[in-house]
């Protein structure tokens, strides 16, 4: 599994449409609308580097409204959510 975070600059009037198109792409698990220097952040979970490259350089490029990106490759995912779920004794998580 190859994970990446893509930080995006998007035309202001296209943010919601771009977010919906991104989340429909297989391999993009989440899209966050954020404040700060970027407009959207996409979380990609791809099967390998070739799949990641296809998502970023082929599928995402087809979406109009994205004006710039920065892709961060994840070496390791560390998540308290995953750890807590692993050791859960059956109680529901809120």
Image: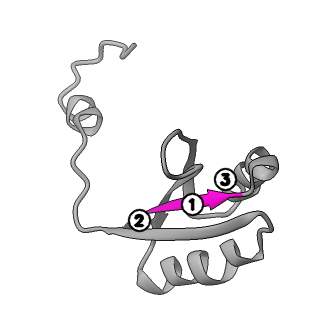
Which element carries disc 2, helix, strand or loop? Answer: strand
Callout in the foreground (1, 2): 1
Q: Which residue is mark 3?
A: 23
Query: Residue 4 shows which numbered tag?
Result: 2
The quarter holding residue 54 reads bottom right
Query: For the point 26% across and 54% down, which residue is it?
Result: 77
Q: Quadrant of the N terminus?
A: bottom left
Q: Is residue 69 left or right of residue 22?
A: left
Callout in the foreground (3, 1): 1
Q: CA distance from mark 3 to mark 1?
A: 14 Å
Q: Is residue 1 visible?
A: no
Q: Quadrant of the C terminus?
A: top left
Query: For the point 27% across and 38% down, which residue is it?
Result: 82
Q: Residues within 10 Å of mark 1 (few under 14, many from 20)?
A: many
Query: For the point 72% across and 56% down, which residue is it?
Result: 24
For the rendered model, the colour scheme is one colour
Q: Which residues are magenta?
A: 5-10
Query: For the point 77% across and 63% down, which residue is it?
Result: 65
Which element carries disc 3, helix, strand or loop? Answer: helix
Label located before the other in sequence (2 or 3):
2
Q: Residues within 10 Å of mark 2 (few under 14, many from 20)?
A: many
Q: Which residue is mark 1?
A: 8
- Residue 60: give x, y in percent of width and height: 67, 72
Query: Residue 56 shows which numbered tag?
Result: none
Magenta region, main secondary structure: strand
Of all residues shown, which one is farthest toward the bottom? 50
Q: CA distance from mark 2 to mark 3?
A: 14 Å
- Residue 57: give x, y in percent of width and height: 60, 83
Q: Is residue 8 visible?
A: yes
């Amino acid at each position: 599994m190859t994970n990446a975070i893509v930080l995006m600059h998007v035309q202001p009037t296209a943010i919601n449409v771009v977010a919906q198109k991104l989340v429909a792409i297989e391999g993009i698990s989440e899209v966050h609308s954020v404040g700060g220097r970027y407009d959207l952040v996409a979380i990609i979970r791809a099967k390998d580097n070739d799949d990641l490259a296809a998502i970023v350089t082929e599928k995402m490029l087809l979406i109009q409204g994205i004006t710039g990106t920065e892709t961060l490759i994840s070496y390791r995912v560390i998540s308290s959510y995953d750890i807590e779920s692993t050791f859960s004794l059956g109680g529901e998580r809120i």
